[in-house]
Image: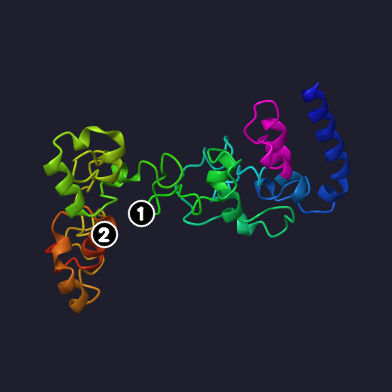
Amino acid sequence: MTDILVLAVLILTTVANTAYSQSTSNTGCKKDRLRPNSCFYFMLKGYCTDGRYSAYMKTRCSSMCGYCCPDGTLSQLPFNQGCKDYECAQTDRLPLLTNVTTKKTCLQYYNDITLNSSYPWVKYYCENTFGWCCMDKKTFADGVDEKGCPYKLCYNVNSDEYCLNQTKTDSRYCDSALTRQKCAWTCKKCKAKKPTDCGLFGCCWNGVPALSPDYRDCQPCRDISSHLCNQFRHACLPIGQYRLREFALTRCPRTCNLCV
């Protein structure tokens, strides 16, 4: 009975939106054929990923369901999951839906205890607020609030001193999944890095493959500030604080002896 009612709603909505789709220029996956509020309502109901309605949503609400990749091609899966370069957007997309009048803010959705934060649309539209993106702004977390990021990027959530003290006082501290999440770097429970393909001429100081043997195409190897780099020189050594470590290795290459 429920399926019949849903089908009836979809048909009625399609008829009601016919004038809208005919009066709006169609630019492929970048334009929805239904009205924005209609597509948004169906998306919240889970129809973008529901196998019973996904084909309908792909043709009628392709943009709302995230079928349009950043390069303009049409993805085979909703919410950009089938796109060639499937990485974090580094921001929330929900505020960009200026033509949807029925939406809340991402923060309101985050504070809604009845909302299932694993909904695919949440990850797509409220990525930043829900913490679906790791600190490198490229890697997706395994869940909300940056779950799994310490393992993927190899850092300590707590201070290095705290983590070291915990391992000294408790020899089995790193055996727990919860504590490993907080002290992944100290516990040496990190994801193995992919080998760098430096090509024929090797890599520049920042790990980017060089295009010529004299490295003339590489970024200049210089510190952003001699004062700041000297102040944070200790971060050149292996440490478990991600932001400080990345600052030293990317902004202070000369101080960290990374220049080729």
Q: Is residue 234 magenta?
A: no
In depth, the one of 82 and 143 nearer the eye is: 143
Q: Amino acid at mark 2?
A: Glu
Q: Is residue 163 left or right of residue 131?
A: left
Where 89 sits versus 82, above or below? below
- Circle 2 residue: 246
Where 56 sits versus 73, above or below? above
Q: Which residues are magenta?
A: 41-61
**For the N terminus, which image quadrant?**
top right
Classed neighbour count for the residue bearing mark 1: other residues with Cα under 10 Å, few (<14), some (14–19), many (≥20):
some
> Mark 1 and mark 2 in contact (Cβ < 8 Å)?
yes
Q: Position of residue 43 (x, y in %)?
A: 68, 41
> Looking at the image, is mark 2 or mark 1 earlier in the sequence?
1
Q: Is residue 79 left or right of residue 53?
A: left
- Badge 1 marks a residue whose secondary structure is loop
- Circle 1 residue: 136
Q: Position of residue 173 (x, y in %)?
A: 20, 37
